[in-house]
Amino acid sequence: MKDDLAKLIELIDNGGLNRRAFLGRTAAFGLTAALGTSLLPGAARADEPKKGGVLKLGLGGGESTDAIDPGLADGPVAFNVNRQWGDTIVNVAPDMTIEPSLAEAFESNEDSTVWTFRIRKGVKFHDGSEMTPEDVAATFRRHSDQNAKSGAYGIMQGISDIKVDGDNVVLTMASGNADLPYLLADYHLVVQPGGGVEDPNKGIGTGPYKIASAEPGVRYVFEKNADDWDTTRGHYDSIEFLIINDTTARTAALQSGQVHMINRVDPKVAKLLSRAPGVVVTNASGRGHYVFIMHCNTAPFDNNDLRLALKYAINRQEMVDKILDGYGSVGNDIPINKSYPLFDESLPQREFSIEKAAEHYKASGHDGSPIELIVADGAFPGAVDAAALFQATAKQAGIPLEIKRVPDDGYWSDVWNVKPFCASYWGGRPVQDQMYSTAYLSTADWNDTKFFNKEFDDLVLAGRAETDQEKRKEIYSKCAHILWEQGGVICPMFNDFVDAHSETVAGWIEDSNLELMNGFATAKTWFA
């Protein structure tokens, strides 16, 4: 047993065994949890949160054009900024259940057409005013307004009526939706005073930290919210974000101690970084995916044969191996994978085929002019290298793919959802309805492939209302087949969320929803 225990300790030192796995194996040896914990590195021994300190993060994915308005959060930094100062009414827990937040309880009628959310009392906004059900209702109404340009607009379209009834906010659906709480956990739906109608960029919320200063694309500073309604979070005195878009510089900042935590670790250096003294690399697999998106309503991508040619011309396994270094899995040109409970495994895997790519390219009648793919380092880790691999395999099929590399700054405002062919990423969503409603419904503001298909729209709406899970799975299967055959998304890979932090940070847990513990790393961790 002594030799086995020594091997376990060696695995810990080399970063090859996490806390959960270690405790499980020590239990198998008849050791106590206390003994198992005592053998862990210092960061894992601190089971009780400690207060104080300044946590510094080095974040990639920030731009000078980033807004505070949660509805406009379209990149990693904007997402993480809003997690500091804002709350939604419910959250998706790491185990994929719904946990209460600003709504302390909720229920629906039998057919899920009416949902009632009891809003928590005694919660104060950062300006000292008390949050009310009217603020929640106003927030939902603002994000239901197409003029707000909210990323949540697509998922709000199923709500036909929003009203306040005492301490409750009552939402009436156009048709039943058993997944509504998952949709309302969307990170855009941060509750603001008066819904944020007057000034959505003011950054007044109910979150664990207040905005002290904001320099988009450069630096953000947050201070502890002394009146936080949730006493189980927000253990640091303050939080500082340094925007470091260069992957190498971001990694170096963590190793040198300039920052305590970073996002978007390049998978190609993750294993090497995990061996660096004082550094812990984490990865969580889930629904995140890296994509190349084509506007289906813009030539030459309005030709489905051309779209299919490009889909067959990409070598997915090569990208998983070379870009993700194994931190992910092969995609299949839809935004859904086996992480979703209603995933249809009968959908054929699209294989890399030079012959089929050439066949569809010829059938498209394309004139042979360069097909421009716009990409930036910040689109996703390894995006430029992925584009180069794509260009090489497309060339084998006679497809004249041309890569245009642009700066990170302005990419999410000037390229994504604007230009007809570019690289992008999606963090995924907890349920299929939310993913489809956010990015593929014809009415969605973030329909970044400009995919307008009435049959698909009708199926998504039907899926919302269906309560029989087998029938619902059949509906989503039809949705998947339509996107697979006609959509504008090329999805070569599903990525793990690879982050890293100093061993002085305690309380880290695995959360496959989004990077940095679904954006809650700053709220839920502490200095050991």
Image (cartoon, grey):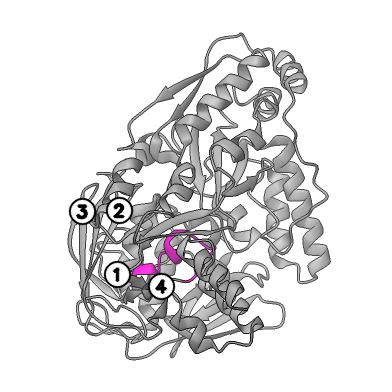
Q: Are marks 3 and 1 in contact (CB under 8 Å)?
A: no
What's the amino acid at mark 4? Pro
What's the amino acid at mark 3? Arg
N-term mark: 4 or 3? 4
Q: Magenta stretch containing residue 85, yes or no?
A: no
Which residues are drawn in magenta? 509-522
Q: Position of residue 122 (x, y in %)?
A: 32, 91
Q: CA distance from mark 2 to mark 1?
A: 28 Å
What's the amino acid at mark 2? Gln
Q: Which residue appears at 23% of the width and 82% of the height?
A: 129
N-term mark: 4 or 1? 4
Q: Which dot, 4 or 1, sits closer to the camera?
A: 4
Per the rendering, the mark at residue 318 is: none
What's the amino acid at mark 1? Trp
N-term mark: 4 or 2? 4
Res 228 → quadrant: bottom left
Say whether residue 197 is left or right of residue 258: right
Graded by Cα atoms within 10 Å as few (under 14), some (14 to 19) or many (20 or more), the crowding at tag 4 reads some
Graded by Cα atoms within 10 Å as few (under 14), some (14 to 19) or many (20 or more), the crowding at tag 3 reads some
On the image, numbered disc 2 is attached to which residue? 255
Name the residue at the front extreme. Answer: 3
Per the rendering, the mark at residue 41 is: 4
N-term mark: 3 or 1? 1
Q: Which dot, 2 or 1, sits closer to the camera?
A: 2
Per the rendering, the mark at residue 219 is: 3
